[in-house]
Image (spheres, rainbow, N blue to C red):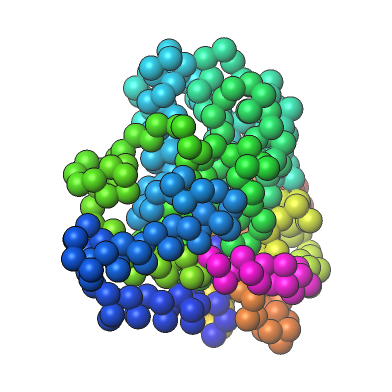
Amino acid sequence: MIYADNAATTKMSEAALRTMVTVMNENYGNPSSLYRFGQRAKEILEAARADVASVINAEPREITFTSGGSEADNQAILTAAELGRKKGRKHIISTAFEHHAVLHTLKKLEQNGFTVTLLDVHENGLIRPEEVEAAIQEDTCLVTVMYANNEIGTIQPITEIGAICRAHGVLFHTDAVQAIGHLPIDVKAQNIDMLSASAHKFHGPKGVGFLYVKKGIRISNLIEGGAQERGKRAGTENVAGIASCAAALKEAAAGMDETAANLKVKRDRLIAGLREIPHSALNGDETQRLPSNVNFCFEGIEGEALLLLLDQKGIMASSGSACTSGALDPSHVLLAIGRVHDVAHGSLRLSIGEDITDEEVEEIIGSVKEVVAYLRGFSPIWRDLTAGKKPFIL
Ligand SMILES: *Cc1c(COP(=O)(O)O)cnc(C)c1O
């Protein structure tokens, strides 16, 4: 079995697993309890906060733990919207290929009187900073642009975007769920006001993540209740999950350069191998992309059929994001970079992990070639294309 869907979720690291079980076993106290056992849980919580803060060059009090990336995205955007509303600034800038946790939150704000500019994504899967700047209006309260895209892996120029937002006095949020633990992040140097993270994308547990909010920005809470997380996120803290999240992030950050260098070699071999398939194309820039991400379109096939046949060969991959698979609509990300429907349907995302071997890389290439050829063998679209009834796009 080859697991090549690390953008959907990752396997927990040994350190993350050990930390989680140890905390669950040895300290099940409530951090809000006053006796020492509870206070020990509070110490574990605060140590985790300090650890994740230091990885992104933030201060511990700038970190709010959440149930994951989606919650952090919701809270960041609603925080900026609330601040904007108070100043009569109700315009938000984002991009057409954000995660649905961002896009759907923006939709809701549009129904509540906000206007949203979704920037076009260029064919290479990148946003241009000058286009962000040009979209800023008097009443813009937020720019939210993801650090790395979850489907095509392209890395956005967020340092430049952060500088532009700072110069214009507009809040800048980045969904860094795919980037954190995999790419360097320095919230101060990069002028990031808010950042979302999720533990299960960097070998931590599911259902835990965090939101960084620069000090001085008043956070709106999504969940009312007790005074946990400085009153900004009620509910007894997931202490074991939070400690495990911090352990996973520290480990990922420490090994980041080496992991990236190793993954890049394998990614580039996959790209070269899959390019040998006729009428195929890589989605997204070849180098400005996550070291783990390969995303292709193959003309004349259905991505779903490709995935099912790869699964039978023991290869786990994706056609887009896990959140949209199951729906037959083509990926909004591939449409955003200009792929037409027919082509976008034939997509494959491979997101590899650091333990993948060279043999497994070759096995993936061989299997994809075989399955694409097999599916094209009885595809009516492929027959029309090869008969010249329809022009090839790729
Ligand atoms: C996975 C993902 C999310 C959602 O995170 P959850 O912890 O699963 O809620 C948000 N944004 C991006 C870019 C993601 O890849």
Of residues 192 and 28, the one nearer the viewer is 28
Residue 190 as seen in the image, left or right of residue 326: right
Of residues 143 and 44, the one nearer the viewer is 44
Residue 329 percent across, percent down from the top left: 48, 48
Residue 342 percent across, percent down from the top left: 61, 49
Quadrant location, the N terminus:
bottom right
Q: Which secondary structure type mostly characterizes the magenta part of the structure?
A: helix
- The answer to whether any part of residue 98 appears in the image is no
Q: Looking at the image, is 184 positioned above or below residue 366?
A: above
The residue at the point 23 percent across, 68 percent down is 36
The residue at the point 58 percent across, 53 percent down is 56
Q: Which residues are magenta?
A: 249-265
Residue 82 as seen in the image, left or right of residue 356: left
Q: How many marks?
A: 0
Residue 16 belongs to the span the image colors magenta: no
Residue 24 percent across, percent down from the top left: 29, 76
Q: Looking at the image, is 45 positioned above or below residue 175?
A: below
Residue 55 placement: quadrant:
bottom right
Residue 42 percent across, percent down from the top left: 31, 62
Residue 257 belongs to the span the image colors magenta: yes
Q: Looking at the image, is 18 positioned above or below residue 7?
A: below
The residue at the point 64 percent across, 49 percent down is 186
- The answer to whether any part of residue 51 appears in the image is yes
Residue 58 as seen in the image, left or right of residue 60: right
